[in-house]
Image (cartoon, rainbow, N blue to C red):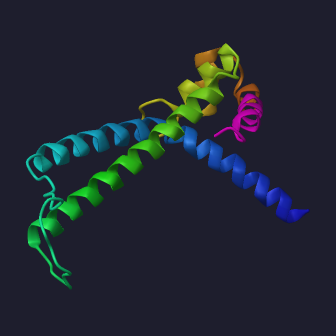
């Protein structure tokens, strides 16, 4: 029974952490897209050579610095693209989960989790902003996270 409670708490805190990181995830996504853009600009002009019409024999352990550089850039591009896709999926999952919420719940999430402050606003601040008591906001938070945690 205790391990089930710990597991539930972990999914709750994981979901809440994803909400807190939503804005930084969007900024990281834009940064990755910029990195990919510069890498692709730097990469232009390096194209593979086709030996389809050439007669060739078996070669063993030949290493070419240009080929190694091209392969390294390809791996970098694929790595960045994978990171971009992962962040985009996570952002879409959060946005999709938020569609389940009522307007006042969305306002609570927006003010508490998506604010650009260094520290999250207190529950008293959240309550004043959306027109509820801090105790009611905490109850709403629990309901919200429990409602969306399986989706994000």
Residue 17 in picture, x, y percent from top left: 58, 46
Instruction: Kindly tell me whether residue 142 is visible in this rendering.
Output: yes
Residue stretch rendered in magenta on the structure: 139-152
Most frequent secondary structure within the magenta stretch: helix
Between 26 and 79, the one nearer to me in the picture: 79
Residue 83, placed above or below residue 56:
above
Residue 12, placed above or below residue 4:
above
Residue 67 in picture, x, y percent from top left: 15, 66
Q: Quadrant of residue 107?
A: top right
Specify whether 122 is left or right of 101. Answer: left
Viewport quadrant of the N terminus: bottom right
Specify whether 41 is left or right of 110. Answer: left
Residue 26 in picture, x, y percent from top left: 40, 36
Which residue lies at the image location 25% right of the left edge and 44% below the top edge?
Answer: 36
Viewport quadrant of the C terminus: top right
Which residue lies at the image location 77% right of the left edge and 32% below the top edge?
Answer: 143
């Amino acid at each position: 029974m205790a391990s089930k409670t710990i597991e539930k708490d972990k999914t709750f805190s994981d979901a809440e952490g994803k909400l807190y990181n939503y804005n930084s995830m969007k900024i990281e996504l834009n940064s990755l897209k910029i990195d990919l853009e510069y890498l692709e600009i730097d990469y232009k002009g390096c194209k593979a050579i086709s030996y389809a019409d050439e007669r060739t024999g078996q070669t063993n352990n030949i290493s070419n610095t240009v080929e190694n550089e091209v392969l390294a850039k390809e791996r970098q591009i694929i790595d960045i693209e994978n990171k971009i896709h992962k962040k985009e999926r996570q952002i879409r999952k959060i946005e999709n989960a938020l569609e389940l919420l009522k307007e006042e719940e969305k306002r609570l999430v927006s003010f508490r989790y998506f604010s650009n402050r260094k520290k999250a606003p207190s529950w008293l601040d959240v309550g004043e902003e959306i027109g509820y008591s801090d105790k009611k906001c905490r109850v709403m938070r629990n309901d919200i996270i429990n409602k969306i945690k399986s989706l994000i």
